[in-house]
Amino acid sequence: MTSGSTPPAGPAGSAAARSVTVRVPAKVNVQLAVGPPRPDGFHDLANVFLAVGLYDEVTATAADELRVTVSGPDAAAVPTDTSNLAARAAQLLAARHGREPHVHLHIAKDIPVAGGMAGGSADGAGALLACDALWGTRTGTDELLRICAELGSDVPFSLVGGAALGRGRGEQLTALAAKGPLYWVFAVADGGLSTPEVYGEFDRLAADRAVPDPDPSPAVLDALGSGDPTALAAALAAIAGGNDLQPAALSLRPSLAGTLAAGTAAGALAALVSGSGPTCAFLAPDEPAATEIATALETSGTCRKARVAQAPAPGASVVS
Ligand SMILES: C[C@@](CO)(OP(=O)(O)O)[C@H](O)COP(=O)(O)OP(=O)(O)OC[C@H]1O[C@@H](n2ccc(N)nc2=O)[C@H](O)[C@@H]1O
Ligand SMILES: Nc1ncnc2c1ncn2[C@@H]1O[C@H](COP(=O)(O)OP(=O)(O)O)[C@@H](O)[C@H]1O
């Protein structure tokens, strides 16, 4: 083999790489203001996204067909066919570049499944970045973000991470200042909630009232920028907790009220359902308090397990 045809020894992510691993964070919606349903079935949002330090890892390896495998305690709940957002990401990227989506995608799953923490979106964004690096297709950020928006409303945020305001259906992002670390505790429930069903329940509960256009709370944005958990909790209290989907999630899963109460009793400054749920998110004053809240939640019997995570977390990034 001549030196010209020998793949150069390069860093993972170069055209020479045979395997690329990308780490992608989960999210919590610090505020989720939901407008009325649009003609296309989506809802306009003011979605204050915050990436948190629970991660999935997506590894893309050269293969002669598209294949998805999943590991982790909740792996059995994740589809491995082309409904998996990671597989769909590979297909969309390959189509953009006129190539076959031949790749083995392995997802090391740590983000709760169907939990309102955007785990599927994370895997979609992670697969996109991993395949782009593996295939050497060098797709620009704007094009990657367009593909993310095709995959799902939350996927663009999974790519960028940090903190951002999502307008439209959540896909139109503006970066937000966020100072850390903020310590969050996540109470993971048994079983998930379907995002479309929760939006449907929101519509049912709102049927006899006018739903205002969604807007972010300036106090929430200020508190996020200052990194002061007490100020953030006060700003959330002033807007009835901040998540307009919370009553719908509670209506579909009334037991979540007990989870929220257990975290509050254990010292959480704020307690809210994460997005469409059923994961509940608790803002802690500091790291030791977060550990105490997690222990109290696990012994309360109101959740399957509790996880502590710091925020803001970086977006999707190549780790090897
Ligand atoms: C609620 C949120 C909050 O961040 O996330 P989760 O808590 O589920 O993770 C998101 O809006 C979920 O976004 P995502 O999970 O990407 O949803 P998509 O695949 O785009 O849409 C799935 C379905 O949810 C509903 N949907 C989603 C987004 C939106 N702005 N309005 C909607 O009504 C629609 O019924 C849509 O068909
Ligand atoms: N890579 C993936 N990981 C998890 N779920 C996925 C994935 N791809 C598709 N799904 C489907 O998306 C649904 C929602 O999963 P997930 O994104 O974890 O939750 P949420 O939308 O509540 O944040 C799952 O029930 C599953 O059927």
Image (cartoon, rainbow, N blue to C red):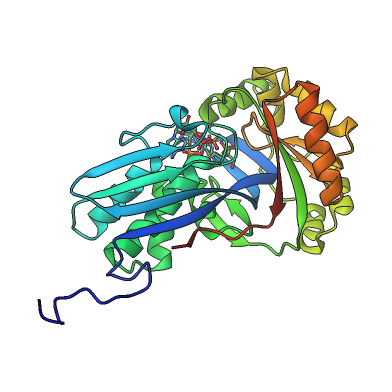
Task: Tell me residue 154's x, y (percent).
Answer: 52, 46
Instruction: Please report the residue visible at 78 percent of the width from the left and 22 percent of the height from the top.
Output: 257
Task: Tell me residue 229's x, y (percent).
Answer: 84, 52
Instruction: Please report the residue visible at 86 percent of the width from the left and 33 percent of the height from the top.
Output: 264
Does residue 240 appear anywhere in the picture?
no
Instruction: Please report the residue visible at 41 percent of the width from the left and 38 percent of the height from the top.
Output: 70
Direction from residue 216 to residue 6 in the image, left or right: left
- The residue sitting at the front extreme is 1
Task: Tell me residue 250's x, y (percent).
Answer: 70, 22
Direction from residue 146 to residue 306 in the image, left or right: right
Task: Tell me residue 125's x, y (percent).
Answer: 44, 52
Vertical side of 1 occupied by 128: above or below: above
- The part of the image, by quadrant, that contains residue 205 is top right
- The part of the image, by quadrant, that contains residue 43 is top right
Residue situated in front as seen by the camera: 47 or 133: 133
Looking at the image, how many numbered discs can be counted on the residues? Answer: 0
Instruction: Please report the residue visible at 23 percent of the width from the left and 53 percent of the height from the top.
Output: 95
- The residue sitting at the left extreme is 1
In which quadrant will I find the N terminus?
A: bottom left
Residue situated in front as seen by the camera: 8 or 150: 8
Direction from residue 161 to residue 63 in the image, left or right: left
- The part of the image, by quadrant, that contains residue 114 is top right
In which quadrant will I find the C terminus?
A: bottom left
Direction from residue 29 to residue 191 in the image, left or right: left
Does residue 15 appear anywhere in the picture?
yes
